[in-house]
Amino acid sequence: MSENVMDQIAGELKNSGSQWFPEMGETRGVRIVGHTPKTDHYIYDLVADFANGSERLAAKLYRASKCGQAGARTLAAAETAHLQSVWNVASEKKLAGVPRPIGDFSSIGAVISCKLTGIPLQSIIMKAALLPGYEGLGLLQGAATASGKWLRSFQRMTARPPQPLDTDGLQAELEKLCHSCRGEGLDDISIRKILSGTRAILDHARKPLTNSAVLNDFTPLNVVVMEQGVGFNDFARMEEDGSTYTDPATFLACVEALEKYPFCNRRITTEVQENFLDAYAATDQEREILRVMKMKVLLSMFAAGRTVKESAVRKKVMWANVMKKFIQAAADRSLPSAA
């Protein structure tokens, strides 16, 4: 089924290619050069050949088998709208790293855009952890800095009216997550440390905060490091208005969570976080709130558990033990006021 849809997409792109890239001349053809299967969609790599060169494109095709044809169209329509909205603002504000949308293919459950060429930031972090001397090249530090600058620019260009921080609601969420993690083995001492530490920080955070669009997936795996700067290309979970803390906290938590791998040096993950925060120009208050929000993301990871078959009990236990020790260490480092 997906092959038939992709043939249809390739045909339509061939017919309309010169409309999107008039400077490239006549469209000679559109080739499908690879694909990556995901849980609920496929990512296809395409090359559009023109008289004056070629362009790389990406096609995200939602799986109707997972959500039904109507569901696939709804998801594609929402993502297309988000991408178009961000592209319009990014073009006006001169923010690079946002893929250009190509047409509207949501009626067949697809999203088409220009392809951002680069490698995931997470791959660079892993190389720095595994390859002696790689960290000293400065690529990791530059990528982390570019990520912080890009996210701050994105939030500024999508800024919404200030909203007060719901400290009581946030603390209640943390308490609920801690309760869930207790069932996975998180001890009462760590829970008390986390909740008292977060409460101490939140009691001093009463100022209104500027909301913005929230990507909800700003992770090292989704940040594309290009020749010039970084980019982001997955707007499926984007919200038009939400807390500015969500994306930086998610990024910081995902970087710190890489420490669960024995070969990933904490010095490296700490450096990435500091470079990111410095470039993000986080104020002292923002850094404090991000400590709380980062802990919330880490607890969410722990509470969600590792997705494996029910028969793989040993893997689930190992995952819980690793995450329990990791959460305890993160609480000790991030929430010293709770001691």
Image (cartoon, grey):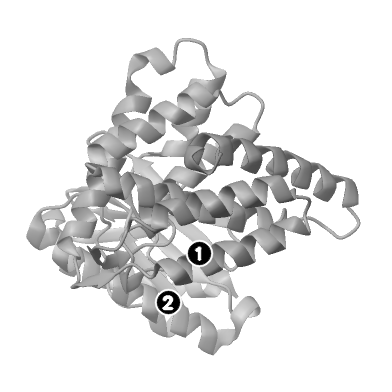
Residue at 51%, 45% in the rendered image: 254
Of residues 14 and 176, which is closer to you in this image?
A: 176
Question: In which quadrant of the rendered view does residue 241 lie?
Answer: bottom left
Q: Which residue is drawn at the image coordinates 43% and 47% (left, top)?
A: 291
Q: How far across and down, in percent of the image, does residue 158 sit?
A: 20, 65
User: Is 47 in front, or is 301?
Assistant: 301
Quarter holding residue 79: bottom left
Instruction: Please tell me whether mark 2 sits on a helix, a strand or a loop.
Output: helix
Residue closest to the eye, 188 or 24? 188
Question: Could you tell whether 109 is left or right of 102 in the image?
Answer: right
Tag 1: residue type? Gln
Q: What mark, if any, has residue 27 been given in the picture?
A: none
Residue sitting at 44 percent across and 16 percent down? 134
Badge 2 or badge 1: first in the primary sequence: 2
Q: Residue at x 60, y 75 (%)?
A: 1
Residue on which the image places disc 2: 76
